[in-house]
Amino acid sequence: MTILLYDLVGHDAARPFSPHCWKIRMALAHKGLAANKVPTRFLEVPEVEGGVSKTVPVIRDGNRVVADSFAIALYLDEAYPELPTLFSGEGGKAMARFIERWSQLTIHPYITSVALVDLHGMQDEPNAAYFRANREQRLGKRLEEVVAGRDAGLAGFRASLEPLRSMLTYQPFIGGASPLFADYIVFGALQWARIASPYRLLDEGDSVAQWFERCLDLHGGIGRQVAAAA
């Protein structure tokens, strides 16, 4: 039975942008599992599988419904152990937990400051109104005020990637010789930025940018199936 993946989109259902959903798109491809994508907008999330989660991704695999990207990845490895692993053991799970925290505390806040207005522009009218009200309440500023600081923060953001940049001098992926779920965590964040905004986060010669290009090519280039924002 084909897995259902509830995938966050804006007014254009062909441009899924959620970093967390992209983690699972890549995880499913890594394991060679087919999935039907269910385009889901912000205001539709409370209706997904009877309100199982306040956020997506959510998957349905037969009778099993799983929410939260990390929990989904764990489930996929446990349910399909004969397929390529996402973690390569308990150490890989622990590493991925660290990478997830690092990504959400270091990478996500800056991408938020870059892409908020562009993300707002990707929504239809009701979802745009929800997005603005929700994010402005959370951040305590208008979207435009948040984005106004992105140029000033760019150098600091690039410097914050130095641990990843340094690690990539030893190996091509966070997972080592080949990618693991830890790679898809960081990939999801940068793919979110790539799809939402044309703002240039990284120089082409940056080893992190080159790693990201390798990730875009993985699994038949599924990351490139959605064009970068122009």
Image: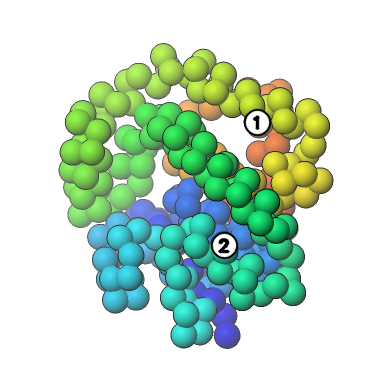
| For residue 27, side relative to residue 156 (left or right) | right
Check disc 1 and report its element: helix, strand or loop: helix
| For residue 9, side relative to residue 219 (left or right) | left
Above/below status of 36 relative to 109: below
Which mark, residue 36?
Answer: none
Instruction: Give the CA distance from mark 2 to mark 1.
Output: 22 Å
Write the residue at 18% across / 43% down.
133
N-term mark: 2 or 1? 2
- Residue 55: horizontal and vertical position, in percent? 35, 58
Looking at the image, do the residues carrying marks 2 and 1 touch, with CB atoms under 8 Å apart?
no
Label 2 CA crowd tier, 10 Å (few <14, some 14–19, many 20+): many
Q: Nearer the viewer, residue 193 or 58?
A: 58
Q: Can residue 62 be seen from the camera position used here?
A: yes
- Residue 68: horizontal and vertical position, in percent? 44, 60
Amino acid type indicated by mark 1: Leu
Above/below status of 58 relative to 49: above
| For residue 171, side relative to residue 71 (left or right) | right
Write the residue at 21% across / 50% down.
130
The residue at which mark 2 appears reads as 73
Q: Nearer the viewer, residue 90 or 160?
A: 90
Amino acid type indicated by mark 2: Ala
| For residue 209, side relative to residue 195 (left or right) | right
- Residue 179: horizontal and vertical position, in percent? 72, 50
Give the total of numbered labels: 2
Quarter of the picture containing the N terminus is: bottom right
Which mark, residue 164?
Answer: 1
Above/below status of 217 relative to 149: below
Write the residue at 66% across / 74% down.
80
Q: Nearer the viewer, residue 42 or 92?
A: 92
Check disc 2 and report its element: helix, strand or loop: helix
